[in-house]
Image (cartoon, grey):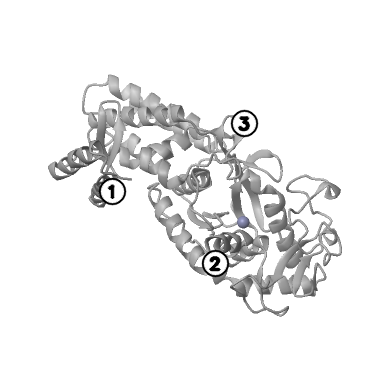
Amino acid sequence: MRAIRLYDTQQRQVRPFEPRDDGKVGIYACGPTVYSRVHVGNARPFVVFSQLKRFLEHEGYDVTLVANITDINDKIYTAAREAGRDSDGLAREMTAHYIDDTERLGLGRPDHEPLASEYVGPIVDLISALVDSDHAYAASGDVYFRVRTLPSYGELSRRDVDQMDQGEGIEGADLKEDPLDFALWKAQKPDEDTSWDSPWGPGRPGWHIECSAMAEELLGLEFDIHGGGIDLVFPHHENEAAQTLAGRGKPLARMWMHNGMLEASAGEKMAKSVGNIRRLTDVLDDVGGTVLVLYFSGGHYRQPLAFSPEGLEAAAAGARRIRDAARRLTPGASPEALAPHREAFFEALADDFNTPRALAALYEWVSEANKLPEGAGDADLREMLGVLGLEALLESEEAPAEAVALAEQREAARRDKDWGEADRLRDELRDMGWEVRDGPQGPELVKAS
Ligand SMILES: [Zn+2]
């Protein structure tokens, strides 16, 4: 096996990846809270950890990827109230949308996608262990974590305990022994339409404890990689780590891996409050899953990535370049002369999962293959694209006559400003596996992904 190095947020350094169990890897990546359609930034951790799983599998590991779905949360109650509907129904609908949207990335699904609502038993068990060991206390139906009982608290985010704000506002402030404490369980409020039974009365879990319990259930303690966006380091991951260490006496994860944020433009946060968020489904309608995955792969996972039309265009041009080269290849082993580029691709991934450097090696491979007489074997390219989840770039792009006819009808409907009919035809095409995109020479049909 190739030696793999990854940056560990806990130790603030790149270090050798050594799994807990020989040949096996457990990864837990924090997923979305399902209160609205996910935005394109939510796709970044999905892409990073799906590709990491593919790479580790390529290297011979048996990988289990867990990406949770937070379906019990304050944001869901608030959004449901604003929409005048039940929170359970809203969470179910948004979960289905999240699955559909991420499915279109063409990366397959994580091995487990646990819903918090299905793990309330293990969550209550972990809270009970914390209460029994005095790391937590009940107060008027709530339960709070007693932060100052854990001397190592703050090690992951490297913050001074006295500078910390749990972000819980005034909620429970009068019940907390210390403003630093955070909620593990919240008693049901009159305007909340769901609740679960517990030793402390009806209520629901806090966000952080959901992940600690689900990760332990599905991967055991001290699993290999805990991942998520860099914005989750504090308080979410700090608190996940604290709960498990205090309740079980063992660390939750051996390594913490965080992806940089997708920014609206360089240095500008993508945020609902700023109004510059783009929904994943809309971006996929524009460029398709393959181009979006290629776009994400062009940035190092730890760096922020500015979301721009130019960046997407560059990714689309890259996709065309790979498709053009692939057309000239034949099935089978690739020439020895191209092997160093293949090797550089996998070395780059082994070096803190450097996908931009890996892509550069892939494009080198393509350039060199283009110089060879027609008929070079495609095995290397297939292998590299497979690890990035971009194998669709090798598929033939010839659209059937029926699809072409539908696309022409759709163009006519658009010219007549009959948007309803145009949308209907677009959906019909998508059901056939084709998408219409605006290319430089007008609309073109590409394989849906
Ligand atoms: Zn989490």
Q: Quadrant of ligand 1?
A: bottom right
Q: Marks 3 and 1: which is nearer the front?
A: 1
Q: For this view, does 285 lie left or right of residue 3?
A: left
Q: Under tag 3, what secondary structure?
A: loop
x, y percent for residue 415: 23, 36
Distance from disc 2 to disc 1, alpha carbons, whole Å, reads 31 Å
Amino acid at dot 2: Ser
Amino acid beneath label 3? Gly
Mark sitting on residue 87: 2
Image height of 27 relative to 268, above or below: below
Q: On residue 267, which mark appears?
A: 3
In percent of width and height, residue 424 lies at 26, 50
Answer with the quarter of the image where residue 142 lies. Answer: bottom right
In the image, what residue occupies the spot 52% across and 47% down? 42
Q: CA distance from mark 3 to mark 2?
A: 34 Å
Determine if residue 386 is in view: no
Q: Which mark is residue 420?
A: 1
Q: Could you tell me how far apart the alpha carbons at marks 3 and 1 are, in whole angstroms?
A: 38 Å
Circle 2 SS class: helix
Q: Residue at x 43, y 40 (%)?
A: 293
The disc at residue 359 is none
